[in-house]
Amino acid sequence: MAILDGKVPPGPVAEKWTNHKFNMKLVNPANKRKFTLIVVGTGLAGASASATLAELGYNVKTFCIHESPRRAHSIAAQGGINAAKNYQNDGDSVHRLFYDTVKGGDFRARESNVHRLAEISPNIIDQCVAQGVPFAREYGGTLTNRSFGGAQVSRTFYARGQTGQQLLIGAYQAMMRQVHAGAVQLYTRREMLELVVVDGAARGIVVRNLSTGEVESHAADAVILATGGYGNVFYLSTNAKQSNATAVWRAHKKGAYFGNPCFTQIHPTCIPVSGDYQSKLTLMSESLRNDGRVWVPKNKDDKRSPEQIPDAERDYYLERVYPSFGNLAPRDVSSRQAKFRVDEGRGVGPSGQAVYLDFRDAIKRLGESVVSERYGNLFEMYEKITGENPYQLPMRIYPAVHYTMGGLWVDYNLMSNLPGLHVLGEANFSDHGANRLGASALMQGLADGYFVIPYTIGHYLASTALPKVTTDHDAFKAARADVDARTQRFMAIKGSRTVDDIHRELGQIMWEYVGMSRQETGLKTALEKIPKLREEFWQNIRVSGDATGTINEELEKAGRVADFLDLGELMARDALHRNESCGGHFREEYQTPDNEAQRDDEKFCYVAGWEWKGEGKPQELHKEPLTFENVKLATRSYK
Amino acid sequence: MGGTSQRNINLKLKVWRQKGANQQGHFEEYDAKGISTDASFLEMLDVVNQRLIKEGRDPISFDHDCREGICGSCSMVINGNPHGSERSTATCQLHMRKFNDGETVVIEPFRAKAFPVIKDLSVDRSALDQIIASGGYISVNTGNAPDANGLPVAKVDADQAFNAATCIGCGACVAACVNGSAMLFVGAKVAHLGLLPQGQPERNERVLAMMDKMQELGFGNCSNTGACAVSCPKDISFENIARMNREYAKASIKKRS
């Protein structure tokens, strides 16, 4: 075990970033065009980084798996983006956003990173408005805000229930402007299958063209991964179907440490599973909890229709248990409470695996038109999926996997332990600790891409000797050979199970044992079941079609599921080693008498960074100790 | 287990199969049996594909990703209508409770000169990205922005700009149009940016550049049938095209004078 150095700059937390920006080396404008940078992913982090780095003068090569960069999964974020603007005059500040985020993450994030995020947050809103992002406004023409979980101020900017879409289109358009200018070379329908490391530094990638099956190599001076999270390890999640961990996992296998893999966010308000054909789950934005009230019947197995259950026989359990935050308790806390109620036998709907999110009182108070203005598109989406009208009947909701706080380990400069490999957005582990607050993912993705990496990557390029490397280098040849060998192996298995079939089974194991609540015996069971399933995968999957010449989605999925099997095992191992409860990681053995998460700061106040040691060998654990100098370590309470 | 009226239905599918851009395509028939009415249309296709794979056959290719109606990946024509006949709904949000037991469903890719088929129901819509690259943005480098509240925007303008900005870039408008025109797509972007004060400096250049690019890429022109707006899963208003024509005329005159 080694101690990981987060390379946090010295000085008071509020001055670190300012001082660091001055102390970092610069690349002069004329020299920037001599550097080529690879960006993988075109979500908020990748598109904003590509646009900004190209504006600065770098040569940027940008890759995405979609047929258009605008389809990246950031597009689906609904509720909003936090920023410490204090436009509402309600007591917000950079320090309060910093404080809320550190506390919300249950003291498992790096203070310095979180402070920087809060400092940058107002600039993000400015930048987006300048690009034409149509945020919600007041009649006077100023921007409006709403509240999100884990905060007692209104600091969330939004564009109805489509904030991610509008922010992504802003970043996408900025990037397409650079494509037009020739500063960004865009490669669509390309999946990164290998990271190429030369003399210890990340110098390129190998990708597969998903339309033709051709394998291509690309060299650069540095590589930026902005490839999103790994929630699809659970098969059913709110992630898009193509969201996957392959880019980060292949980088991990080349030496990049994986940080806090067990920190998974289960979002409390999703549409429940309806059947075994289910391909994904749909989120109902947290913003709904501004006006919706969460409840279950007081009586077990109450089969009455919800409108027939009088108020006296309803348990508005979030308001009861957390009077000061009420329905806006943070995600991890709200999800667990929903699970407790269902486990007590008070779940609702045909499956009993749901709770109500009720707008009856909001409609009475505000009128249907105001409710529709705020949440209309979400109500429509709910009705399309379930066939029920939420203006008349409460929504049925249940927690589902939504976001992964863990990811590749990065230092303060967003560089992994592998020099030259930078990781942005959900793909890194950095800012959310053990639980992300609502409306903070969009903030982090854009902070990393617009305002952090453009500074820190310059420092890396200016302070590192980077001899010329081309794709003729042996490391590229070896990486391509690995890609080809893996493809041939998948095609040759010709077994009897589909890739989805194995993926679903992995998802069931993960949800059962590494999901909303975990315990030692269950995690050990998962660690027995996953290797068996992996063996089954490598012996018995069937990938039909051809490996080259055209689209082969089964082959794409096979590579992703192979990586999910490895990653799922690491998640279980990480969850087993962390003998405490914190944020989204709830170990049943470690809870307070009133069922809240019980941290162990003496033993676990660190980031777990796992090092790949080779196929079939367990990863080695390294630790980055966390210190809290500005937000006092305390039990997190929302009561 | 969703709606209480859940039941299973059987369908006959006639699906367009085409191995590649330069190959001849044809319809093939498949049975979709025991499909839950709570399933989505894409989940119905998943069920069919799982069976095809187990039989060693090539599954049907179709673009999909978020399955929440927002990424714009879906690109199929169902019974003659892009995204099917239900209004304001992308294919992924279409649910099987809208179909009848025993029905035959015809599934084809979006068809347009500017959208070549890649395989089966997957088409190449990168021409839409090229239109955006030609001018569908506000030119502001990162770091140049004034305070966000420094530039008030009337709520009515902000709301209208938002309505146009909700376009998901799926291309259903192009597939629905007899001329294969992308004018609703272009009109929506011209309206989104042109209605905002931030978009004024480049207003004229933007509409000219985007329209020229659209024509260069093989999209047709508008003959006012309105089919585009009917097929739009996000209800982008047909008025955007009229607005764009006015903007285009004004910009052209300005350019000449």
Image (spheres, coloured by chain):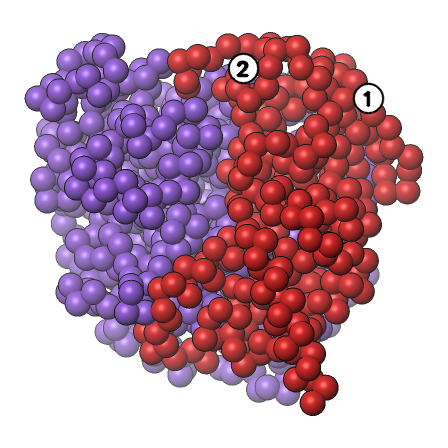
**In the rendered image, which quarter is residue A114 located in?**
bottom left
Q: Eyeballing the image, is A55 above or below B226? A: below
The colour chain A appears in is purple
Q: Residue at x 59, y 53 (%)?
A: B238
Q: Looking at the picture, how far across and down is residue A599, in whole percent?
A: 21, 40
Whether residue B57 is visible to the viewer of this picture, yes or no, is no
Circle 1 residues within 10 Å: few <14, some 14–19, many ≥20: few
Q: Residue at x 22, y 67 (%)?
A: A86
Q: Which residue is mark 1?
A: B28
Q: On what subunit does the disc labeled 2 rest? A: B
Q: Eyeballing the image, is A180 above or below A156? A: below
Q: Looking at the picture, how far across and down is residue A59, in whole percent?
A: 67, 73
Q: Residue at x 50, y 30 (%)?
A: A280
**In the rendered image, which quarter is residue B133 located in?**
bottom right
Dot placed on the residue nearer the N-terminal end, 2 or 1: 1
Q: CA distance from mark 2 to mark 1?
A: 23 Å
Whether residue A384 is visible to the viewer of this picture, yes or no, is yes
Circle 2 residues within 10 Å: few <14, some 14–19, many ≥20: many
Residue B55, disc: none
View extreme (front): residue = B224
Left or right: B252 in relation to A163: right
| Quadrant in the picture for the C terminus of chain A | top left
What amino acid is labelled 2 in the image?
Ser
Q: On what subunit does the disc labeled 1 rest? A: B
Left or right: B134 in relation to A262: right
The colour chain B appears in is red
Q: Eyeballing the image, is A370 above or below B253? A: above
Q: Which residue is mark 2?
A: B36
Q: Looking at the picture, how far across and down is residue A254, in whole percent?
A: 60, 49
**What SS does tag 2 mark?**
strand
